[in-house]
Amino acid sequence: MLTANKIKILVVDDDEDDYFIISDFINEIDKNKFVIDWCNSYQLAIEKFSRSEYHIYFVDYRLGNKTGLQLLKQAARLECNDPIILLTGKGNKEIDIEAMKNGATDYLIKSELNAEKLERCVRYSLDRAAYLKAIKESENRLKTFFRSGPDAIIVINEKEEILEWNPQAETIFGFTAKEAIGKILSQTIIPKQYRKAHKKGMFHFLETGEGPVLNKTTEVTALHKDGHEFYINLSISSVKIKDEWLFIAFLSDITERKKTEEALIHKEAELLQARMLEEKKNEFLSIASHELKTPLTTLKAYANMVFELSKNNSSEAIQQYLLKIDQYSNKLNFLINELLDVSRIHAGKLSLNHTEVDTKHFLPNVLNAMQQITLTHKIILKENESATVRMDPLRLEQVITNIISNAAKYSPGKENIIVNSVKKNGEVIVSFRDYGIGIPKEKLTKIFDRFYRVPEESNKFSGLGIGLFVSSEIVKQHGGKIWATANNDEGSTFYFSLPTVKKIKKSLSSAQLER
């Protein structure tokens, strides 16, 4: 342990008289400032050095059959960084030079010693030791950063020779430090197509001191040991040491980031293309629907006129044909109206005319009208609880028509469609159960998407996949929900729910109270 607030000195000399002489001189400086110990053998001195117990060492050149120079070398092996002053009986330039080469802080001749000279030597040695210690610590920090930093660090000279190559550079480029150091940079990690430009840039800098890539971060491609090219971030700084330029490069592999960026760009392009196609599709639907509407209205009017004029003058077969024309004109008109609704929904222009309606009367009327045109199935209303709902009757009739039409279409050979309307938690829930082919559970969330049709059945049944989409939007604009479930035995059940007027008023009152 170092003595607190005192400088501890070890004199290594096999002559005790010399130890006393040196001690007396040091005590002349300030005997309360120093603690002086003596060691008279080479081997004991090595033990002392290994424990780093002293601030400063005075070592005699002659130590029995060993020399102070040998002890200096041994101290270096033990990583003793404290100052060591070599003492000798007489001056010898060769020993002086050799001592300094081996780490001695100073070289003193015993016959020339005095208190003043020793004070200067001790002060200088300790100051120099503190300075060297600070440099050593700084070097250690730099080495730690160099070895453990997140970036590859490469140092080259103005001849492009690689001088430093850290572990991260080994990881990124595949070359070990042993393989890379001493090689020419442009022949190692720069792709062939960029080497000429690199050499030109280096020549320009050495001539003018200007470099377009210095002191900024750029993205470039680099060459891996295995031959593949990849993206890196590159930042280069330059420093001039002893009339020679050195270049320090910090590099990081950005391959994954570039892949992510390219994927995002590709995705954005796909989304843009999809959006443009969607807009074109909606524009086409709007134009086509309007263009079809006018001739269809004219065709229907002429068919009705011919039917009235030929009531008493034509055969029953002709009358049936005219009725068929009217029937299919109505179907086509319904389809065109739904296409127009799709365009209105996309443009946010689907309008509703709300009024308060009692579902107890509304639902049977709609179902009776549907039964008149649904000849293959029997529509059975089992439960019909009274509930007042704020709705657009024509739009809700459109929703019910769509659901029942689908129920009939997808349950060929079956007889019944079961309808129920019940009140629950301030909502009216209307359900439609069929006993048809059913819907796979994994497709239940998709059937309300625009133009979606269950792939397995799309070739067996006609349709465009817009009825349920339009119905879903109408129900949502009423503040309701729409969904479907697959029945365990057969078929499926469709539901929609609407808030009652009572629930809406209660919600508005609560909102006003909160304000």
Image (cartoon, grey):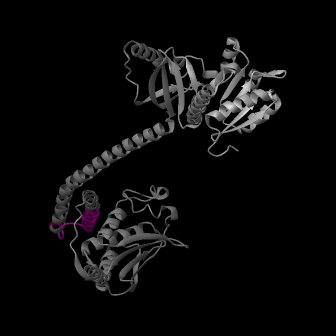
* Camera-nearest residue between 346 and 333: 346
* Camera-nearest residue between 42 and 333: 42
Q: Residue at x 33, y 87 (%)?
A: 386
Residue 73 falls inside the magenta stretch: no
In the image, taking residue 13 as reference, residue 25 lies left or right, namely left
Give percent across and percent down for residue 363: 32, 81
Residue 316 falls inside the magenta stretch: yes
Residue 339 visible in the displayed image: yes
Q: Residue at x 37, y 71 (%)?
A: 481
Region rendered in magenta? 309-334
Give percent across and percent down for residue 409: 41, 66
Rendered position, 87 above or below 333: above
> Given the current orientation, which residue lies at the most extreme right position?
65
Residue 484, quarter of the rendered image:
bottom left
In the image, taking residue 102 as reference, residue 206 lies left or right, namely left
Q: Quadrant of the C terminus?
A: bottom left
Dominant secondary structure (helix, strand or loop) of the stretch shown in magenta: helix
Residue 27, quarter of the rendered image:
top right
In the image, taking residue 219 as reference, residue 11 lies left or right, namely right
Q: Residue at x 55, y 26 (%)?
A: 228
